[in-house]
Image (cartoon, helix red, strand yellow):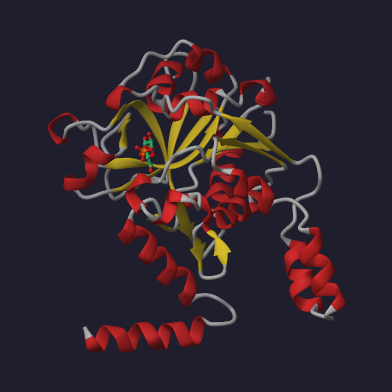
Amino acid sequence: MKPVKKAVLPVAGFGTRVLPATKTVPKEMLTVVDRPALQYVVDEAIEAGIEHFVFITARGKIAISDYFDTAYELEDALQRKGKTDIYNRLKAKQPREGTMSFVRQQEAKGLGHAVWCARDIIGDDPFAVLLPDVLIQSDVRSCLAQMMEAYHEVGGNIIAVDPVPDERVSSYGVIKPKDPVTAKTKTIIPMDGMVEKPALKDAPSNLKITGRYILQPELMGLLKDQAAGAGGEIQLTDAMARLMKTQEFHAFVYDGQDYDCGSKLGYFEAVMAFARIHPDIGKDARALIRKSAEQA
Ligand code: G1P
């Protein structure tokens, strides 16, 4: 079994749900406590053993590649002023040269198309996909690290899933488990199908696709000629459903809580959740949240 060392992060979207904030700031760069949302996703992937990141970017998203670059003037100023702590923290987050690639998606044709833009860099290797809108907080190992453990057990393709209430089912990709899901169902679930944004009456389960995937490279060949699906976009879910005819897929119920930072409320929840556990401000943040709840 080939190890998963590459990850694709689609970051080309406009972030229309949080305009006007995203008119000049890419949504992935919005601050969650003291870091851009994207940094949490990169950290999650590093914990899982990812060594190369492929960002699928677009015009107006230069802030993302600049963020991962050396900021010479800033670093020089910090060193000259003796702000060694801040300098060291900044450098600790800097990726090693040559470990990040930036590919432009020239037309917004959908998530499947965005992932396909990484095909030359992925080559014949299995790869992870992380949707950076979604931040996942976990008390154990990062979501992708948990998925890697499942991958070592069963191989093939692994998709992170989480139950959602009926009224939200049609906002997501939804999986069809091979056997009915019961309280005894394990965290690794053999799959029979999946569908993107189904009407509630057509939904094969209430297990939504969360935005973390481990995929085999053969998917790229299917994405190449994938027809547009839900919303008129080339959907990753549709190509995965085709790959399922020849390869094993398992859904994985992770331990953790996901936050949709592409929405106003999800972003607000993420800021609260990460503030609560932050080493510098966690205690005060929890007190503030309690105080605010009493006033509400
Ligand atoms: C995408 C995927 C969908 C998944 C969702 C998770 O949809 O296509 O299958 O459930 O992310 O956030 P989007 O939110 O881009 O419409």
Q: Does residue 46 lie above or below 252 as drawn?
A: below
Nearer-the-camera pick, 54 or 73: 73
Q: Residue at x 47, y 56 (%)?
A: 136
Residue extending furthest right? 80
Residue 198 at x, y percent in the picture: 22, 31
Relative to 44, is 238 on the left or the right? left
Residue 30 at x, y percent in the picture: 49, 58
Residue 287: quarter of image: bottom left
Q: Does residue 243 lie above or below 154 as drawn?
A: above
Q: Does residue 121 lie above or below 213 as drawn?
A: above
Residue 71 at x, y percent in the picture: 76, 58
Residue extending furthest left? 201
Nearer-the-camera pick, 253 or 233: 233
Relative to 240, is 125 on the left or the right? right
Residue 7: quarter of image: top right
Q: Does residue 177 lie above or below 252 as drawn?
A: above
Q: Which quadrant of the rendered structure holds the N terminus?
A: top right
Task: Confirm whether residue 296 shows in the render.
Answer: yes
Q: Residue at x 45, y 39 (%)?
A: 13
Task: Confirm whether residue 254 shows in the render.
Answer: no
Regarding ligand 1, which quadrant of the image does it lie in? top left
Relative to 198, is 33 on the left or the right? right
Q: Residue at x 32, y 89 (%)?
A: 291
Q: How many marks?
A: 0
Q: Which quadrant of the rendered structure holds the C terminus?
A: bottom left
Residue 72: quarter of image: bottom right
